[in-house]
Amino acid sequence: MKIGFIGLGIMGESMCENIVKKHNDTVYCNDHKQSQIDKLCSFGCVGCATNEEVAEKADIIITMIPTGRHVKETYTKLLPYLKEGKICIDMSTIEPSVSVEVAKEVMATGAEFADCPVVRSKADAIKGTLGVLAGCKKELFEKIKPILEYVGCTIIYMGENGKGLAAKICHNTLVAQISNGVNETVLLAQKLGISIDNFAAAVAAGGAQCAYMAVQKENLKNEDWTTAFSMENMDKDVNICYNIAKEEGFSMPAMEVVKGILDEGVRRGWGKQDFRQTYRIVRGD
């Protein structure tokens, strides 16, 4: 089956590269940046002039694009090219309600649809070791799982359409809260004369041990804000969580604190840098 990939951003380009290397049939791609298309073509991908061309030529269409608005606009244009036998896999992180709406429109054409957002970072996208959270019919999940394994090593079925995204939004909100907890306690420990290295060792030895502290220790020490996951993307995800919680009438005070910090980082113009730069806001810079 021929695969089409739309959206070659920070995560998408590496995901598409892994698909090209592992899939034994043609892979098409498109992006709003010609340089990204050219880069993937150098690995054997076949570039397309438009998203519609991708949808027309591919049996499986994978999208990895920024926001719910972008996803809705993209699939509205793709609908005339969809039909029975085609499969759409949206790996973007957007509002679950928007994804469910898009899924209904896609399935009305006879095509199938799954929301399959990913977790972990750019490094995992490069290595093909992402986590993938799938929301779709169980039968479709079994059909697309081998494709998802091109980009991830942990593929989890979360339930019907929208459930992959529901899990992803909760996951990223937890990551943001863990990050803020690390920022606050690391900074207080330093005020008390404890180095980041020693505090990280204390955390690893006790019940507070967490992957975030282990992975980010050196970056925080060196104040390296090189982007693995951008501030603007984390801010988007936490704001989606905020709106969902509000709709559900569910109070999440810690999430609201993190939302305020991320909003401030974006206001400062740090949106393209890594979200761990919230460390500077907590420090009072």
Image (cartoon, rainbow, N blue to C red):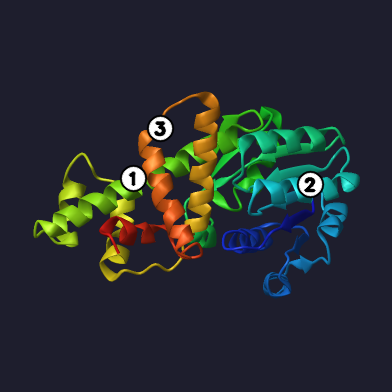
* Residue lying at 40% horizontally and 39% vertically, measured from the top left: 255
- Amino acid identity at mark 1: Ile
The quadrant where residue 177 appears: top left
Please tell me whether mark 3 or mark 2 is closer to you in this view.
Answer: 3
The quadrant where residue 117 appears: top right
Residue 229 in sight in this render: no
Residue 281 in sight in this render: yes
In this figure, which residue is indicated by the disc labeled 1?
178
Mark 1 crowd level (few <14, some 14–19, many ≥20, 10 Å Cα): some
In this figure, which residue is indicated by the disc labeled 2?
75
Counting residues from the start of the chain, the first of labels 1 and 2 encountered is: 2
Please tell me whether mark 1 or mark 3 is closer to you in this view.
Answer: 3
- Amino acid identity at mark 3: Met
Is 139 situated above or below 201? above
Q: Residue furthest top?
A: 249
* Residue lying at 15% horizontally and 50% vertically, measured from the top left: 202
Residue 45: horizontal and vertical position, in percent? Answer: 73, 67
Which of the two residues, 56 or 19, is positioned nearer the viewer here? 56
In this figure, which residue is indicated by the disc labeled 3?
252
Counting residues from the start of the chain, the first of labels 3 and 2 encountered is: 2
